[in-house]
Image (cartoon, rainbow, N blue to C red):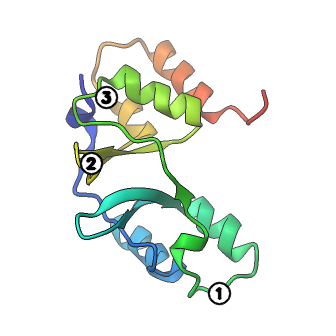
């Protein structure tokens, strides 16, 4: 099974100039917790912003809802390709301790998102214990 088989296609995206309030509203409207940040005419992925980024890097720091996403986003996220197998996606999640991975085409344009929940809900033949170990490794606190 490949990333293409599980990814959410055409995810909502933002730009570095989008405000934290705008992105929070996008997350609410589209029921998502991670938004790719695109730059340039073609929309190349340069970062991601999560609901946690907004909470910890903006709200908790007392920043304004007008704070540009470029000030709180995570730069240079690990991405995968549509034809990557799920084992490769799992490794990206485990190594980066991230729960969501942008799926990009050859030009770096965002064509989808794949989430930890997508892996857990997949109908592939992996035993539940294997899926549980992957979820556990993604969720391990840093430094363990």
Q: Dot 1: few (<14), some (14–19), or many (≥20) neighbours within 10 Å?
A: few
For residue 138, side relative to residue 103 (left or right): right
Look at the numbered disc 1 and give the secondary structure of its residue: loop
**Nearer to us in this view, 13 or 16:** 16
For residue 101, side relative to residue 74 (left or right): left
For residue 29, side relative to residue 112 (left or right): right
Q: Is residue 43 above or below residue 135?
A: below
Q: Is residue 69 above or below residue 117?
A: below
- Mark 2 or mark 1, which is nearer the start of the sequence? 2
Numbered circle sitting on residue 64:
1
Residue under numbered circle 2: 8
Q: Image point 47% across, 57% down: which residue?
A: 47
**Nearer to us in this view, 5 or 66:** 66
Numbered circle sitting on residue 122:
3
**Nearer to us in this view, 133 or 72:** 72
Residue 143 in the image: x percent, y percent?
79, 32
The span from disc 3 to disc 1 (Cα, nearest Å) is 39 Å
Which of the two marks, 1 or 2, is nearer to us in this view? 1
Look at the numbered disc 2 and give the secondary structure of its residue: strand
For residue 116, side relative to residue 96 (left or right): left
Residue 136 in the image: x percent, y percent?
61, 27
- Mark 2 or mark 3, which is nearer the start of the sequence? 2
The span from disc 1 to disc 2 (Cα, nearest Å) is 31 Å
The span from disc 3 to disc 2 (Cα, nearest Å) is 13 Å
Q: Quadrant of the N terminus?
A: top left
Look at the numbered disc 3 and give the secondary structure of its residue: loop
In this figure, what is the number of numbered marks?
3
Residue 2 in the image: x percent, y percent?
24, 27
- Mark 1 or mark 3, which is nearer the start of the sequence? 1
Numbered circle sitting on residue 17:
none
Residue 50 in the image: x percent, y percent?
53, 59
Residue 72 visible here: yes
């Amino acid at each position: 099974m490949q990333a293409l088989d599980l990814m959410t296609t055409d995810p909502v995206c933002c730009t570095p100039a989008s405000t934290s309030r705008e992105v929070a509203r996008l997350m609410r409207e589209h029921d998502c917790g991670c938004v790719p940040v695109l730059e340039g005419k073609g929309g190349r992925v340069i970062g991601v912003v999560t609901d946690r980024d907004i909470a910890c890097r903006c709200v908790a720091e007392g920043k304004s809802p007008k704070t540009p996403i470029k000030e709180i986003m995570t730069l240079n996220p690990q991405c995968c390709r549509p034809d990557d197998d799920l084992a490769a996606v799992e490794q990206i999640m485990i190594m980066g301790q991230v729960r969501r991975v942008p799926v990009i085409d050859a030009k770096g344009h965002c064509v989808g998102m794949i989430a930890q929940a997508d892996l857990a809900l997949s109908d592939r033949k992996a035993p539940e214990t294997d899926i549980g170990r992957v979820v556990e490794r993604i969720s391990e606190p840093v430094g363990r």
